[in-house]
Amino acid sequence: MQQAQRIAGIICEYNPFHNGHAYQIQQVRRCAQGIVAVMSGNFTQRGEPAVVDKFSRTRMALCGGADLVVELPVPYAMNTAQRFAQGAVQVLEALGCVDILAFGSESGELAQLEELSRMLEGQQLYEQVRRRMRDGVPFAQARQEAVSQLGSPALGARLRDPNDILGVEYLLALRRVGSGIQPLAIPRKGAWHDGEPREGFASASWIRERARCGDWESLGGYLPPKSLELLQREWERGAAPHTISNGERAVLGVLRRMTLEEWAALPDVGEGIHNRIHEAVRRQCSVQGIVQSVQTKRYPAARIRRILMAGYLGIGRELGTMPVPYVRVLGLNRTGAQILRQSRRTAAVPVSHRLALLARQGEACRRFSEIECRASELYGLLAPEIEAPCMEFAHPAVVEQTAFEEQA
Protein backbone atom coordinates (compact mmCIF):
# COMPACT_ATOMS: atom_id res chain seq x y z
CA MET A 1 0.00 0.00 0.00
CA GLN A 2 1.33 3.43 -0.90
CA GLN A 3 1.70 5.99 1.87
CA ALA A 4 -0.66 8.35 0.03
CA GLN A 5 -3.53 5.86 0.12
CA ARG A 6 -6.24 6.59 2.65
CA ILE A 7 -7.27 4.33 5.49
CA ALA A 8 -10.75 4.39 7.01
CA GLY A 9 -11.87 3.12 10.38
CA ILE A 10 -15.27 1.60 11.13
CA ILE A 11 -16.48 0.99 14.70
CA CYS A 12 -18.69 -2.08 14.82
CA GLU A 13 -20.07 -5.18 16.52
CA TYR A 14 -21.02 -7.28 13.46
CA ASN A 15 -23.43 -9.36 15.53
CA PRO A 16 -23.62 -10.80 12.90
CA PHE A 17 -22.17 -9.21 9.73
CA HIS A 18 -25.07 -8.56 7.33
CA ASN A 19 -25.90 -6.79 4.06
CA GLY A 20 -26.12 -3.40 5.74
CA HIS A 21 -22.54 -3.75 6.94
CA ALA A 22 -21.41 -4.86 3.49
CA TYR A 23 -23.15 -1.82 1.96
CA GLN A 24 -21.38 0.50 4.40
CA ILE A 25 -17.99 -0.96 3.48
CA GLN A 26 -18.78 -0.55 -0.23
CA GLN A 27 -19.56 3.13 0.34
CA VAL A 28 -16.38 3.65 2.35
CA ARG A 29 -14.33 2.06 -0.46
CA ARG A 30 -15.18 5.07 -2.59
CA CYS A 31 -12.81 7.23 -0.57
CA ALA A 32 -10.46 4.78 1.15
CA GLN A 33 -8.18 1.99 -0.01
CA GLY A 34 -7.83 0.32 3.38
CA ILE A 35 -10.47 -0.39 6.05
CA VAL A 36 -9.80 -1.04 9.73
CA ALA A 37 -12.72 -2.41 11.74
CA VAL A 38 -12.65 -1.79 15.50
CA MET A 39 -14.94 -4.61 16.63
CA SER A 40 -16.39 -5.52 20.01
CA GLY A 41 -15.17 -8.86 21.27
CA ASN A 42 -17.43 -11.45 22.85
CA PHE A 43 -19.73 -8.99 24.65
CA THR A 44 -21.74 -6.13 23.17
CA GLN A 45 -22.83 -2.64 24.15
CA ARG A 46 -26.36 -3.89 24.96
CA GLY A 47 -24.92 -5.91 27.85
CA GLU A 48 -25.33 -9.24 26.07
CA PRO A 49 -22.95 -11.89 24.73
CA ALA A 50 -22.41 -11.80 20.99
CA VAL A 51 -24.30 -14.66 19.33
CA VAL A 52 -21.09 -16.09 17.83
CA ASP A 53 -17.53 -15.65 19.02
CA LYS A 54 -15.28 -12.78 17.97
CA PHE A 55 -13.03 -14.88 15.73
CA SER A 56 -15.98 -16.16 13.66
CA ARG A 57 -17.24 -12.58 13.38
CA THR A 58 -13.75 -11.44 12.41
CA ARG A 59 -13.77 -13.89 9.52
CA MET A 60 -17.20 -12.60 8.48
CA ALA A 61 -15.82 -9.05 8.47
CA LEU A 62 -12.75 -9.94 6.40
CA CYS A 63 -14.84 -11.89 3.89
CA GLY A 64 -17.23 -8.91 3.80
CA GLY A 65 -14.60 -6.35 2.83
CA ALA A 66 -12.71 -5.24 5.95
CA ASP A 67 -8.91 -5.45 5.73
CA LEU A 68 -7.81 -5.32 9.35
CA VAL A 69 -9.95 -6.20 12.38
CA VAL A 70 -8.82 -5.04 15.80
CA GLU A 71 -10.53 -5.61 19.12
CA LEU A 72 -12.42 -3.02 21.13
CA PRO A 73 -11.48 -4.10 24.68
CA VAL A 74 -14.44 -5.31 26.70
CA PRO A 75 -14.30 -2.49 29.32
CA TYR A 76 -15.21 -0.08 26.48
CA ALA A 77 -17.32 -2.46 24.37
CA MET A 78 -19.77 -3.08 27.20
CA ASN A 79 -20.18 0.49 28.41
CA THR A 80 -22.22 3.63 27.82
CA ALA A 81 -22.38 5.13 24.33
CA GLN A 82 -19.89 7.79 25.42
CA ARG A 83 -17.34 5.31 26.80
CA PHE A 84 -17.89 2.94 23.87
CA ALA A 85 -17.18 5.74 21.40
CA GLN A 86 -14.27 7.14 23.39
CA GLY A 87 -12.52 3.78 23.60
CA ALA A 88 -13.03 2.95 19.93
CA VAL A 89 -11.82 6.36 18.74
CA GLN A 90 -8.75 5.99 20.96
CA VAL A 91 -7.98 2.65 19.29
CA LEU A 92 -8.12 4.23 15.81
CA GLU A 93 -6.11 7.24 16.93
CA ALA A 94 -3.51 5.01 18.58
CA LEU A 95 -2.79 3.26 15.27
CA GLY A 96 -1.57 6.60 13.96
CA CYS A 97 -2.39 5.84 10.32
CA VAL A 98 -6.19 6.14 10.06
CA ASP A 99 -7.49 9.08 8.02
CA ILE A 100 -11.29 8.65 8.14
CA LEU A 101 -13.85 7.49 10.69
CA ALA A 102 -16.92 6.22 8.81
CA PHE A 103 -20.15 5.51 10.64
CA GLY A 104 -23.73 4.65 9.77
CA SER A 105 -26.31 7.38 10.23
CA GLU A 106 -30.07 7.47 9.99
CA SER A 107 -29.94 11.09 8.81
CA GLY A 108 -26.65 11.09 6.89
CA GLU A 109 -26.37 14.79 7.74
CA LEU A 110 -22.81 15.26 8.99
CA ALA A 111 -23.09 19.05 9.30
CA GLN A 112 -26.18 18.68 11.47
CA LEU A 113 -24.51 16.05 13.63
CA GLU A 114 -21.46 18.31 14.03
CA GLU A 115 -23.73 21.17 15.12
CA LEU A 116 -25.48 18.89 17.58
CA SER A 117 -22.20 17.60 19.02
CA ARG A 118 -21.00 21.15 19.69
CA MET A 119 -24.28 22.02 21.35
CA LEU A 120 -23.92 19.03 23.66
CA GLU A 121 -20.66 20.46 24.96
CA GLY A 122 -22.37 23.65 26.14
CA GLN A 123 -22.92 24.34 29.83
CA GLN A 124 -26.32 25.91 29.20
CA LEU A 125 -27.66 22.71 27.67
CA TYR A 126 -26.63 20.56 30.60
CA GLU A 127 -28.15 22.95 33.07
CA GLN A 128 -31.41 22.37 31.20
CA VAL A 129 -30.84 18.60 31.23
CA ARG A 130 -30.13 18.51 34.96
CA ARG A 131 -33.23 20.57 35.69
CA ARG A 132 -35.43 18.15 33.76
CA MET A 133 -33.83 15.15 35.40
CA ARG A 134 -34.54 16.61 38.84
CA ASP A 135 -38.19 16.56 37.77
CA GLY A 136 -37.92 12.82 37.05
CA VAL A 137 -37.35 12.96 33.27
CA PRO A 138 -34.93 10.23 32.01
CA PHE A 139 -31.56 11.48 30.76
CA ALA A 140 -32.12 10.64 27.08
CA GLN A 141 -35.51 12.37 27.01
CA ALA A 142 -34.21 15.34 29.01
CA ARG A 143 -31.32 15.84 26.61
CA GLN A 144 -33.54 15.59 23.55
CA GLU A 145 -36.01 18.12 24.99
CA ALA A 146 -33.19 20.52 25.90
CA VAL A 147 -31.68 20.34 22.41
CA SER A 148 -35.10 20.92 20.84
CA GLN A 149 -35.62 23.97 23.03
CA LEU A 150 -32.16 25.55 22.74
CA GLY A 151 -31.50 24.48 19.18
CA SER A 152 -34.33 23.16 17.05
CA PRO A 153 -36.78 20.23 16.94
CA ALA A 154 -34.84 18.90 13.94
CA LEU A 155 -31.66 18.70 16.02
CA GLY A 156 -33.52 17.14 18.92
CA ALA A 157 -34.95 14.50 16.60
CA ARG A 158 -31.42 13.25 15.86
CA LEU A 159 -31.22 12.07 19.47
CA ARG A 160 -34.00 9.54 18.85
CA ASP A 161 -31.92 7.45 16.45
CA PRO A 162 -29.25 5.09 17.86
CA ASN A 163 -26.75 5.46 15.03
CA ASP A 164 -26.99 9.23 14.98
CA ILE A 165 -26.53 9.22 18.77
CA LEU A 166 -23.39 7.11 18.39
CA GLY A 167 -22.24 9.32 15.52
CA VAL A 168 -22.47 12.37 17.75
CA GLU A 169 -20.46 10.54 20.41
CA TYR A 170 -17.78 9.72 17.82
CA LEU A 171 -17.56 13.39 16.88
CA LEU A 172 -17.24 14.38 20.53
CA ALA A 173 -14.58 11.71 21.10
CA LEU A 174 -12.55 12.88 18.09
CA ARG A 175 -12.43 16.38 19.55
CA ARG A 176 -11.60 15.16 23.06
CA VAL A 177 -8.51 13.30 21.87
CA GLY A 178 -7.52 16.10 19.47
CA SER A 179 -7.69 13.74 16.52
CA GLY A 180 -7.11 14.71 12.91
CA ILE A 181 -9.24 11.77 11.72
CA GLN A 182 -12.03 13.04 9.46
CA PRO A 183 -15.61 11.86 10.11
CA LEU A 184 -17.77 10.43 7.33
CA ALA A 185 -21.50 9.79 7.84
CA ILE A 186 -22.89 6.98 5.65
CA PRO A 187 -26.72 7.08 5.30
CA ARG A 188 -28.25 3.79 6.38
CA LYS A 189 -30.43 1.85 3.97
CA GLY A 190 -33.31 -0.56 4.48
CA ALA A 191 -34.41 -1.91 7.86
CA TRP A 192 -33.30 -0.15 11.02
CA HIS A 193 -33.14 -1.49 14.55
CA ASP A 194 -35.86 -4.07 15.29
CA GLY A 195 -38.10 -3.43 12.26
CA GLU A 196 -39.06 -5.78 9.47
CA PRO A 197 -36.62 -6.23 6.55
CA ARG A 198 -36.93 -4.00 3.53
CA GLU A 199 -34.97 -3.20 0.38
CA GLY A 200 -32.80 -6.30 0.88
CA PHE A 201 -31.64 -5.20 4.33
CA ALA A 202 -32.54 -6.58 7.76
CA SER A 203 -31.47 -5.48 11.23
CA ALA A 204 -29.04 -7.59 13.24
CA SER A 205 -31.70 -8.17 15.92
CA TRP A 206 -34.18 -9.49 13.31
CA ILE A 207 -31.48 -11.77 11.88
CA ARG A 208 -30.61 -13.12 15.32
CA GLU A 209 -34.25 -13.90 16.02
CA ARG A 210 -34.74 -15.73 12.71
CA ALA A 211 -31.54 -17.70 13.32
CA ARG A 212 -32.87 -18.75 16.75
CA CYS A 213 -35.94 -20.07 14.94
CA GLY A 214 -33.74 -22.03 12.51
CA ASP A 215 -35.19 -20.12 9.57
CA TRP A 216 -32.01 -20.21 7.48
CA GLU A 217 -33.83 -20.04 4.15
CA SER A 218 -35.30 -16.62 4.97
CA LEU A 219 -31.89 -15.29 6.01
CA GLY A 220 -30.24 -15.99 2.66
CA GLY A 221 -31.24 -12.64 1.21
CA TYR A 222 -29.98 -10.56 4.13
CA LEU A 223 -26.47 -11.83 4.84
CA PRO A 224 -23.48 -12.23 2.51
CA PRO A 225 -23.03 -15.93 1.65
CA LYS A 226 -19.92 -16.36 3.82
CA SER A 227 -21.61 -14.77 6.84
CA LEU A 228 -24.61 -17.06 6.46
CA GLU A 229 -22.33 -20.08 6.08
CA LEU A 230 -20.31 -19.23 9.21
CA LEU A 231 -23.39 -18.37 11.25
CA GLN A 232 -25.20 -21.57 10.31
CA ARG A 233 -22.08 -23.66 10.93
CA GLU A 234 -21.70 -22.31 14.47
CA TRP A 235 -25.40 -22.94 15.16
CA GLU A 236 -25.31 -26.50 13.84
CA ARG A 237 -22.24 -27.51 15.84
CA GLY A 238 -23.79 -26.21 19.08
CA ALA A 239 -21.45 -23.23 19.43
CA ALA A 240 -24.23 -20.65 18.94
CA PRO A 241 -26.14 -18.76 19.99
CA HIS A 242 -24.38 -17.55 23.10
CA THR A 243 -27.05 -16.20 25.45
CA ILE A 244 -27.24 -15.27 29.11
CA SER A 245 -30.01 -17.83 29.62
CA ASN A 246 -27.71 -20.66 28.45
CA GLY A 247 -25.37 -19.99 31.36
CA GLU A 248 -27.84 -18.53 33.83
CA ARG A 249 -26.77 -20.68 36.78
CA ALA A 250 -23.15 -19.65 36.27
CA VAL A 251 -24.09 -15.97 36.00
CA LEU A 252 -26.37 -16.06 39.05
CA GLY A 253 -23.72 -17.94 41.02
CA VAL A 254 -21.29 -15.05 40.51
CA LEU A 255 -23.87 -12.32 41.11
CA ARG A 256 -25.17 -13.84 44.35
CA ARG A 257 -21.68 -13.87 45.83
CA MET A 258 -21.15 -10.16 45.23
CA THR A 259 -21.16 -7.72 48.13
CA LEU A 260 -22.83 -4.33 48.15
CA GLU A 261 -19.40 -2.71 47.94
CA GLU A 262 -18.55 -4.74 44.84
CA TRP A 263 -21.79 -3.67 43.15
CA ALA A 264 -21.01 -0.02 43.95
CA ALA A 265 -17.61 -0.31 42.20
CA LEU A 266 -19.06 -1.35 38.82
CA PRO A 267 -19.29 0.87 35.73
CA ASP A 268 -22.38 3.04 35.24
CA VAL A 269 -23.59 2.59 38.82
CA GLY A 270 -24.91 5.65 40.61
CA GLU A 271 -27.77 7.15 42.61
CA GLY A 272 -28.02 4.06 44.80
CA ILE A 273 -29.02 1.71 41.97
CA HIS A 274 -26.55 -0.87 43.33
CA ASN A 275 -28.75 -1.26 46.42
CA ARG A 276 -31.73 -2.22 44.27
CA ILE A 277 -29.66 -4.61 42.15
CA HIS A 278 -28.13 -6.24 45.23
CA GLU A 279 -31.60 -6.82 46.64
CA ALA A 280 -33.06 -8.06 43.33
CA VAL A 281 -30.25 -10.59 42.86
CA ARG A 282 -31.31 -12.21 46.13
CA ARG A 283 -34.99 -12.25 45.29
CA GLN A 284 -35.11 -13.15 41.58
CA CYS A 285 -34.45 -16.53 39.99
CA SER A 286 -33.38 -15.29 36.55
CA VAL A 287 -31.26 -12.55 35.04
CA GLN A 288 -34.28 -11.30 33.12
CA GLY A 289 -36.23 -11.17 36.37
CA ILE A 290 -33.49 -9.04 37.93
CA VAL A 291 -33.50 -6.68 34.95
CA GLN A 292 -37.29 -6.32 34.94
CA SER A 293 -37.48 -5.66 38.68
CA VAL A 294 -34.75 -2.99 38.62
CA GLN A 295 -35.20 -1.18 35.30
CA THR A 296 -36.86 2.24 35.22
CA LYS A 297 -37.12 5.03 32.68
CA ARG A 298 -33.91 6.40 34.11
CA TYR A 299 -32.22 2.98 34.23
CA PRO A 300 -33.28 1.13 31.04
CA ALA A 301 -32.84 -2.59 30.55
CA ALA A 302 -29.61 -2.32 28.53
CA ARG A 303 -27.95 -0.33 31.31
CA ILE A 304 -28.97 -2.88 33.94
CA ARG A 305 -27.74 -5.76 31.75
CA ARG A 306 -24.38 -4.02 31.32
CA ILE A 307 -24.05 -3.66 35.10
CA LEU A 308 -24.95 -7.32 35.65
CA MET A 309 -22.51 -8.51 33.00
CA ALA A 310 -19.78 -6.26 34.40
CA GLY A 311 -20.37 -7.99 37.72
CA TYR A 312 -20.23 -11.41 36.08
CA LEU A 313 -16.96 -10.57 34.31
CA GLY A 314 -15.44 -8.59 37.18
CA ILE A 315 -14.95 -5.32 35.27
CA GLY A 316 -14.24 -2.42 37.59
CA ARG A 317 -15.44 1.10 36.84
CA GLU A 318 -11.94 2.53 36.37
CA LEU A 319 -10.99 0.31 33.42
CA GLY A 320 -13.50 1.96 31.08
CA THR A 321 -12.03 5.38 31.88
CA MET A 322 -8.37 4.44 31.31
CA PRO A 323 -6.57 5.23 28.03
CA VAL A 324 -6.32 2.38 25.52
CA PRO A 325 -3.16 0.47 26.50
CA TYR A 326 -2.65 -1.56 23.32
CA VAL A 327 -4.21 -2.52 19.99
CA ARG A 328 -4.94 -6.21 19.57
CA VAL A 329 -5.26 -7.58 16.04
CA LEU A 330 -8.00 -10.17 15.57
CA GLY A 331 -7.61 -10.72 11.83
CA LEU A 332 -6.34 -9.34 8.54
CA ASN A 333 -5.92 -9.86 4.82
CA ARG A 334 -3.08 -8.81 2.50
CA THR A 335 -4.04 -5.12 2.63
CA GLY A 336 -4.50 -5.42 6.38
CA ALA A 337 -0.95 -6.75 6.70
CA GLN A 338 0.28 -3.63 4.89
CA ILE A 339 -1.73 -1.39 7.24
CA LEU A 340 -0.25 -3.30 10.17
CA ARG A 341 3.29 -2.73 8.90
CA GLN A 342 2.53 0.96 8.50
CA SER A 343 1.15 1.14 12.05
CA ARG A 344 4.45 -0.14 13.42
CA ARG A 345 5.97 3.19 12.38
CA THR A 346 3.10 5.34 13.64
CA ALA A 347 1.36 3.60 16.56
CA ALA A 348 1.32 5.26 19.97
CA VAL A 349 0.76 1.96 21.84
CA PRO A 350 1.90 -1.66 21.33
CA VAL A 351 0.16 -3.40 18.41
CA SER A 352 0.07 -7.20 18.03
CA HIS A 353 -2.20 -10.20 17.61
CA ARG A 354 -0.38 -11.95 20.46
CA LEU A 355 -2.18 -11.12 23.68
CA ALA A 356 0.57 -12.76 25.72
CA LEU A 357 3.07 -10.31 24.23
CA LEU A 358 0.77 -7.34 24.85
CA ALA A 359 0.23 -8.43 28.47
CA ARG A 360 3.94 -7.88 29.14
CA GLN A 361 3.94 -4.27 27.98
CA GLY A 362 3.02 -2.66 31.30
CA GLU A 363 0.56 -2.77 34.18
CA ALA A 364 -2.40 -1.42 32.20
CA CYS A 365 -1.75 -3.93 29.42
CA ARG A 366 -1.64 -6.74 31.97
CA ARG A 367 -4.95 -5.70 33.54
CA PHE A 368 -6.76 -5.37 30.19
CA SER A 369 -5.40 -8.68 28.89
CA GLU A 370 -6.49 -10.48 32.07
CA ILE A 371 -10.02 -9.10 31.78
CA GLU A 372 -10.12 -10.15 28.10
CA CYS A 373 -9.05 -13.69 29.01
CA ARG A 374 -11.61 -13.90 31.77
CA ALA A 375 -14.36 -12.60 29.48
CA SER A 376 -13.60 -15.27 26.90
CA GLU A 377 -13.51 -18.05 29.50
CA LEU A 378 -16.86 -17.00 30.97
CA TYR A 379 -18.30 -16.45 27.49
CA GLY A 380 -17.81 -20.18 26.90
CA LEU A 381 -20.32 -20.93 29.65
CA LEU A 382 -23.01 -19.04 27.70
CA ALA A 383 -22.97 -21.37 24.67
CA PRO A 384 -25.67 -24.03 24.11
CA GLU A 385 -23.06 -26.62 25.12
CA ILE A 386 -20.39 -25.60 27.63
CA GLU A 387 -17.18 -24.82 25.77
CA ALA A 388 -13.62 -25.41 26.91
CA PRO A 389 -11.94 -22.14 27.87
CA CYS A 390 -10.67 -20.23 24.83
CA MET A 391 -6.88 -19.98 24.95
CA GLU A 392 -6.76 -16.24 24.37
CA PHE A 393 -3.00 -15.96 24.86
CA ALA A 394 -2.35 -18.58 22.19
CA HIS A 395 -5.13 -17.83 19.70
CA PRO A 396 -3.78 -16.84 16.26
CA ALA A 397 -5.11 -14.00 14.18
CA VAL A 398 -7.69 -14.86 11.53
CA VAL A 399 -6.09 -14.62 8.09
CA GLU A 400 -7.87 -14.21 4.76
CA GLN A 401 -6.46 -13.88 1.22
CA THR A 402 -2.82 -14.12 2.22
CA ALA A 403 -0.40 -16.53 3.77
CA PHE A 404 0.39 -13.97 6.41
CA GLU A 405 3.78 -14.49 7.99
CA GLU A 406 4.44 -13.63 11.61
CA GLN A 407 4.60 -9.85 11.91
CA ALA A 408 3.08 -9.17 15.29
Image (tube, rainbow, N blue to C red):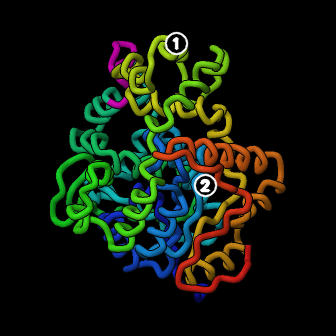
Q: Judge left or right: residue 328 versus residue 53.
A: right
Magenta residue span: 131-140
Q: Nearer the viewer, mark 1 or mark 2?
A: 1
Q: Residue at x 34, y 50 (%)?
A: 163
Q: Residue at x 59, y 25 (%)?
A: 253
Measuring from the top left, give residue 3's x and y in whole percent: 61, 85
- Examine the residues drawn in magenta and state their main secondary structure: helix
Q: Pick whichever, 348 or 351, lies toward us.
A: 351
Helix, strand or loop for disc 2: helix
Q: Judge left or right: residue 22 versus residue 238.
A: left
Mark 2 residue type = Gln
Up-down relation of residue 259 to residue 358 (above or below): above
Q: Is residue 129 magenta?
A: no
Question: Tags 1 and 2 in contact by the CB under 8 Å rule?
Answer: no
Q: Residue at x 59, y 58 (%)?
A: 71
Up-down relation of residue 110 to residue 400 (above or below): above
Can residue 298 be seen by looking at this rendering? no
Disc 2 designates what residue? 90
The residue carrying pointer 2 sits among few (fewer than 14), some (14 to 19) or many (20 or more) residues within 10 Å by Cα, namely many
Up-down relation of residue 21 to residue 205 (above or below): below
Mark 1 residue type = Arg
Disc 1 designates what residue? 282
Tell me which corner region of the image, top left, top right, bottom left or bottom right, holds residue 395.
Answer: bottom right
Q: Pick whichever, 83 or 157, lies toward us.
A: 83
Measuring from the top left, give residue 68's x and y in whole percent: 55, 72
Q: Judge left or right: residue 114 versus residue 158.
A: right
Q: Pick whichever, 330 or 11, lies toward us.
A: 330
Measuring from the top left, give residue 152's x and y in whole percent: 24, 39
Helix, strand or loop for disc 1: helix
Can residue 246 be seen by looking at this rendering? yes
